[in-house]
Amino acid sequence: MTAPMPVGVRDVDLRDPAECARITAFVDASDGATPFHLPAWSLAVQDGCGQRAHYLVSESGGAIDGVLPLTEMRSPLFGRALVSTGFGVDG
């Protein structure tokens, strides 16, 4: 029996073009992914709305096996929250 590969989750620096390219390739190859899963969407929301983008990536053996785009929403009424695919139709 072989031991399973450890899975790591980390917050990606979206200012790194190489990271964004890796994520974009993963999203493009993933069934069921939408444009709202792309780093470009997270960055557009951050730049256009002032809501900070966070992007979690799950990796196993150096390969991406999952992504979770998050938007840090701030509201006087509701406080702070992390919202998946902020401002997206399916989010």
Image (tube, rainbow, N blue to C red):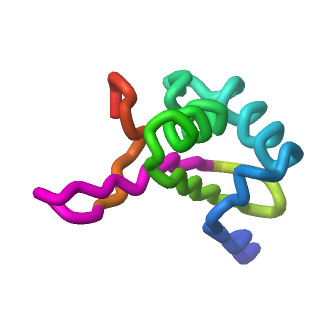
Of 32 and 39, the residue lying toward us? 39
Residue 40 counted in the magenta span? no
Q: Is residue 12 above or below residue 21?
A: below
Q: Predominant secondary structure in magenta?
A: strand
Residue 66 in picture, x, y percent from top left: 60, 49
Residue 61 in picture, x, y percent from top left: 81, 63
Q: Is residue 66 left or right of residue 20?
A: left
Quarter of the image for residue 42 reads top right
Q: Is residue 27 above or below residue 17?
A: above
**Residue at coordinates 28% horizontally, 64% vertically from top-left?**
80
Of 43 and 12, the residue lying toward us? 43
> So how many labels did they put on this image?
0
Residue 79 counted in the magenta span? yes
Q: Residue furthest left?
A: 77
**Residue at coordinates 36% horizontally, 58% vertically from top-left?**
82
Of 79 and 9, the residue lying toward us? 79
Residue 75 in picture, x, y percent from top left: 22, 55
Q: Is residue 51 left or right of residue 79?
A: right
- Which portion, as a residue range, is magenta? 66-80
Quarter of the image for residue 77 reads bottom left
**Residue at coordinates 69% horizontally, 24% vertically from top-left?**
28
Residue 55 in picture, x, y percent from top left: 58, 53
In the rendered image, which quarter contains the C terminus?
A: top left
Q: Is residue 56 left or right of residue 32?
A: right
In the rendered image, which quarter contains the N terminus?
A: bottom right
Q: Is residue 47 above or below residue 15?
A: above
